[in-house]
Image: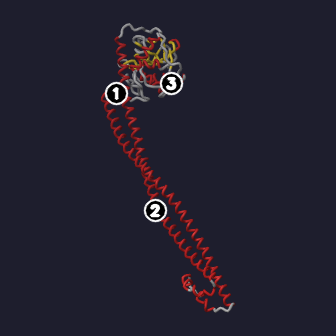
């Protein structure tokens, strides 16, 4: 029994395809429709590939500009540090100049004191007059010879003052020059940094635009691929169902109800009683509307047997991945098996031409009181009928 069951499931797997969440509305798509879908998919892929190349180039350019901007930022930071050093040197030189200026005041005070002392001691004011009327350090140095009477100590003090003043002025000038030069260099580097940052920002915007377009193209490609796969799957599903139905018509010796061979389905259900009744109501509405039977169709204008089941429970609120478009055989393994005397409205009924799972060719929705709603065939259409009106009833129902 277990071996037979394994063989049956293997046959089902071999005869079915993975289904997409939503199928095309065209029943049993033609090869021309599939070819057209393939062409659209190829065009979308070509556009997506071309856009991907542009995006890759733009990203590469962005990486280069980012590296350039980072380098400019590093140079700017270094320039700022060097400017800070130059500013500190300028401030130190300015401080030194202030200190030297204080030394000038002190030197004048000393000279004044010396002149006073010379006068008191009988010296001639004419000897130091050129000193007192000196207009600047250089003229002061030119007249140092007149101070010989003041002593060598005073001469050394004045010479030190002159040297200190010269050094202070030179140091402040050098520091100010360095500060100005570094400020100019910093401004230049700052301009380069801004230019690099602006280029990076502009490229980032361009990359974002290209990425957005690429995302859209990939979305369109995915949609086109889904359409193509759906059409192919729907065609294969319709051909499979049709082939099994045709085989059932020419297979003799079919039982009214097949004996129970122990086939098992799911261990749990996914629906409430309200959902099952809603599915029954939907199937009833389609039958009473006299919708036509079309291979591979699942509504809203036409149905085949498994298409009616799929549409009814989708209407009741089941969606992918909990509910999918399968063939009649797979629905028998996709639902929890219940005995025929325990059927409730909304349970599914299965019909096989030799009592195996793999030969199930028809599926219906139990309406209650031994009756069912079904998409019977192209000849009969959608009808309300007895559960025994079709040969080969499997000995179990399927509760969704």
Give the label on residue 29, or none. 1
Q: Quadrant of residue 152?
A: bottom right
Local secondary structure at mark 1: loop
Task: List the residue tagged with mark 3.
Answer: 278
Disc 3 or disc 1, which is closer to the eye? 1
Q: Is residue 206 above or below residue 235?
A: below
Q: In the rendering, at what x and y percent does residue 325 appear?
A: 43, 25
Disc 2 or disc 1, which is closer to the eye? 2
Give the label on residue 140, or none. none
The residue lying furthest to the top in this view is 253
Q: Earlier in the sequence, mark 3 or mark 2?
A: 2
Q: In the rendering, at what x and y percent does residue 230 appear?
A: 38, 29
Q: Is residue 186 above or below residue 48?
A: below
Q: CA distance from mark 2 to mark 1?
A: 69 Å
Task: List the residue tagged with mark 2.
Answer: 188
Q: Earlier in the sequence, mark 3 or mark 1?
A: 1
Q: In the image, 38: left or right of 263? A: left
Q: CA distance from mark 3 to mark 2?
A: 77 Å
Q: Are marks 3 and 2 in contact (CB under 8 Å)?
A: no
Frontmost residue, 237 versus 15: 15
Q: Is residue 280 above or below residue 92?
A: above
């Amino acid at each position: 029994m277990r071996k037979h069951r394994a063989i049956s499931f293997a046959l089902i797997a071999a005869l079915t395809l993975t289904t997409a969440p939503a199928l095309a509305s065209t029943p049993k798509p033609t090869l021309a429709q599939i070819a057209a879908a393939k062409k659209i998919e190829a065009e979308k892929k070509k556009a997506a590939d071309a856009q991907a190349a542009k995006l890759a180039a733009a990203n590469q350019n962005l990486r280069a500009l980012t590296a350039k901007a980072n380098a400019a930022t590093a140079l700017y930071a270094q320039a700022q540090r060097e400017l800070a050093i130059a500013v500190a040197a300028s401030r130190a030189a300015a401080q030194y100049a202030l200190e030297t200026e204080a030394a000038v005041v002190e030197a004048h005070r000393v000279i004044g004191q010396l002149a006073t002392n010379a006068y008191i001691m009988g010296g001639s004011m004419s000897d130091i007059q050129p000193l007192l009327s000196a207009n600047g350090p250089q003229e002061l140095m030119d007249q140092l010879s007149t101070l010989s009477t003041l002593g060598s100590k005073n001469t050394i003090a004045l010479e030190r003052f002159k040297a200190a003043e010269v050094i202070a002025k030179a140091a402040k000038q050098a520091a100010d020059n360095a500060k100005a030069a570094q400020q100019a260099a910093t401004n230049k580097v700052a301009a380069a940094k801004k230019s690099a940052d602006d280029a990076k920002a502009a490229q980032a915007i361009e990359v974002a635009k290209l990425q957005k377009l690429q995302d859209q193209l990939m979305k369109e490609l995915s949609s086109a691929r889904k359409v193509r796969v759906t059409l192919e799957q729907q065609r294969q599903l319709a051909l499979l169902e049709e082939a099994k139905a045709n085989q059932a018509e020419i297979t003799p010796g079919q039982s009214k109800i097949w004996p129970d061979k122990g086939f098992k389905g799911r261990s749990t259900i996914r629906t409430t009683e309200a959902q099952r009744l809603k599915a029954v109501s939907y199937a009833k509405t389609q039958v009473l509307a006299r919708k036509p039977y079309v291979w591979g169709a699942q509504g809203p204008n036409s149905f085949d047997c498994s298409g009616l089941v799929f549409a009814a429970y989708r209407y009741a609120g089941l969606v992918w991945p909990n509910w999918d478009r399968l063939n009649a055989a797979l629905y028998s393994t996709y639902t929890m098996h219940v005995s025929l005397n325990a059927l409730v409205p909304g349970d599914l009924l299965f019909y096989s031409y030799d009592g195996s799972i793999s030969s199930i060719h028809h599926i219906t929705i139990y309406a209650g009181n031994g009756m069912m709603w079904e998409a019977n065939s192209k000849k009969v259409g959608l009808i309300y009928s007895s559960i025994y009106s079709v040969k080969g009833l499997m000995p179990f129902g399927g509760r969704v």
